[in-house]
Image (cartoon, coloured by chain):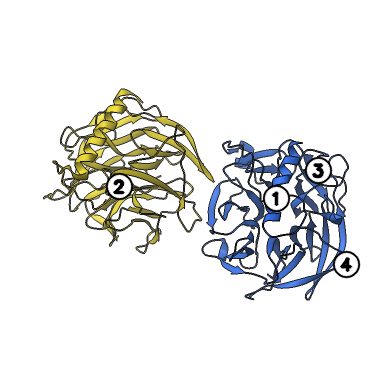
Amino acid sequence: MKRYYWFVPILFVLCACGGNAVAPALGVAPAPHPDRRSSWISPELERTQAPLLFVSDAGTADVYIYNVKTLKVVGTITGFAQPQGECSDNKGNVWVTDASGGTVYELSHRGHLENELVQKGATPVGCTWDPTTGNLAVMSLLGVPSQSGGVLVFPKGVGTPTLYTNSKQYFYNFGDYDAGGNLFFDGRDANGNFMLSELPKGKSSAHTVALTGGTIYFPGMVQWDAAKQDFIVGDQSCGNLYASCVYSVKIAGNTASITGETKLQNSAGGQLCDLVQGVLFNKELLGSDNDFCGSTPSATYIWPYPGGGAPTRYNGKTDSVPVGAAISR
Amino acid sequence: MSSLTTLRVVAALVAGGILAGCGGGVPQVGGPGITSAGAPAVREHRGESWMAKGLKNRDLLYVSNSDGVVNVYRYWQHTLVGVLTNFTQPVGECADAAGNVYITDYTAEKVDEYAHGGKKPIKVYDDSPYQPQACAVSAKTGDLAVANYGYYQAGNIAVYPHGSGSPTFYGGTRDDHFISCAYDDRGDLFAVSNAGYSGIYYSQFYYLPKRGAQLVPMNLPGPSRSWEWRGVRAVAWDGEYWLVDVYGLYRFTINVKATYVDTITLQGDGDLGPVWIYRKNLKSTGSQVVGVENNYGQTDSVDFWSYPAGGSPIAQITKDLDGPSGLAVSMGTPQ
């Protein structure tokens, strides 16, 4: 019952912003129960060089740091307002978008604050780091420059950003760069329909990429899969249901073709309720299920990719309303 | 709040009233909004700098005075071993890992750098048109941060990259008059400004993470819900926690947000000014705290306390002081 109450205000916010989508939680509603705890970092985190999974939780307004191998929590960073999507660079730093106050926090591998990027009026919910330039692209769901969102690109991850938009897109969610430095990002138009856009490297505006081979109902993760040379694009409303899945999407010109679907199960064997953002790492997909559907507790999972199916590991003891995921190497 | 602390607050308020407009014994130097924690009065001083020999491996305590003189003491012996003159209005001080000492000269709008035990500046940072109130040096990068008070205009934080005379300026979000700044061991900067509104000097804190490009306003929770920060004297880093110096030492951690840790009470009989946390080396946390106590014509002193125990002073210097306003410890062994 408690989880149902979570869901209602989130839908209300989405509808009030002009979108028609009836969609699962996006996680941009105010965090109802920030736990106001102090950050803690375990001795293991202070000395580890192992890859870590950072999970943002809009419910507790915290970021949990998991050991990827064990899915044990090795640190908790507190003090956020509405932590959303995440991304990381090749040094192990992780950016955490915070929809409240237009802030993006940069954390080190050990969870120390490295920088804060503040852009008033923005609603940052997703980000990605460009390995070809070192630039940081931040997806602002709404509010830039007026009511529609946009992509803010911070040179080298600092300083004053440049705003990029696709005039046909209204909501901006998640994105990633391909190997050539072209930025692809998803979102919705003003009517709530899924959109995929491309900001070609060096260009000043983005254009729509037509999606073929299937339908995505509500934008989820976007990540470049270097091994397969395609993108993983998530759907938070797979089959127009309260369910999540991810698709393999091949880009050719201005067309994006769905070439495969990966279904993801929760710890009870049911279909995942809401994977807002996952992250591909070493042939595994890592992410959390915001299970407002009520079948299992919200949890952080690891699934084989592209096989999907049952999780190989999970931790259901920590998450409240998990949203973003990023790997710190 | 202990009775001694209460006495200190009353003394500070009385002193603040004198500075703010009563035209008492201490000449006013500040423009609108200058606080009792602002630069002290200018007093002309004549004489040559001198320095004893054999100080190379000695920990030295530098103390700025309102008569324009900087006293140099053996840290552990508390004996005067040198005097630096040639200042107009020395105020804040800081030291780097090599033992070089930086002294802000408020009215002259410059910062002088002295080698450990040196008599003449080895470098002068032109801070004009700003009035440097305090400074800090990053042990990580060697960057020199200068808290510029500002006069009729807002001040700023000027960061001189290691060895550079060309600073980057970081402004606040309001009519900020910066009075102190400090680096932690990672290179993050914590700063505080005071601004006067209706005679009450509210303090605003800022944080500049090591990769940051702008000062981020940082709300610091107090020990109680209704807490307000007024008339903060300085901020510092003790090797583990950030400190806010205002009639006691309030300790915090900062990572995304600030979290209050505890309060250390320093008993004394004057108006506590900036403090210095003595650390044996950069791997250790503070073991002593040293602070200037300005008694406005009474017995000025430099007091030493155990840290983090606080309580009553364990030692005191009272000789050769005249309105002490800032201090720094130059370590005899490079850090």
Local packing at callout 1 (Cα closer than 10 Å; few below 14, some 14-19, many 20+) is few
Chain under callout 4 = A
Reading the image, the residue beneath label 1 is A12
3D distance between C-alphas at marks 3 and 1: 17 Å
Reading the image, the residue beneath label 3 is A293
Residue A326 in the image: state x and y as whole percent. 69, 52
3D distance between C-alphas at marks 2 and 1: 55 Å
Q: Secondary structure at mark 1?
A: helix
Q: Quadrant of the N terminus of chain B?
A: top left
Residue contact between numbered discs 2 and 3, judged by CB atoms under 8 Å? no
Q: Secondary structure at mark 2?
A: strand
Q: Is residue A270 left or right of residue B175?
A: right
Amino acid at dot 3: Cys
Q: Is residue B206 above or below residue A178?
A: above
Q: Which chain is yellow?
A: B
Tag 4 or tag 1, which sits nearer the N-term? 1
Picture disc at residue A213: 4
Front residue of A72/A159: it is A159
Pair 1/4: label in front: 1
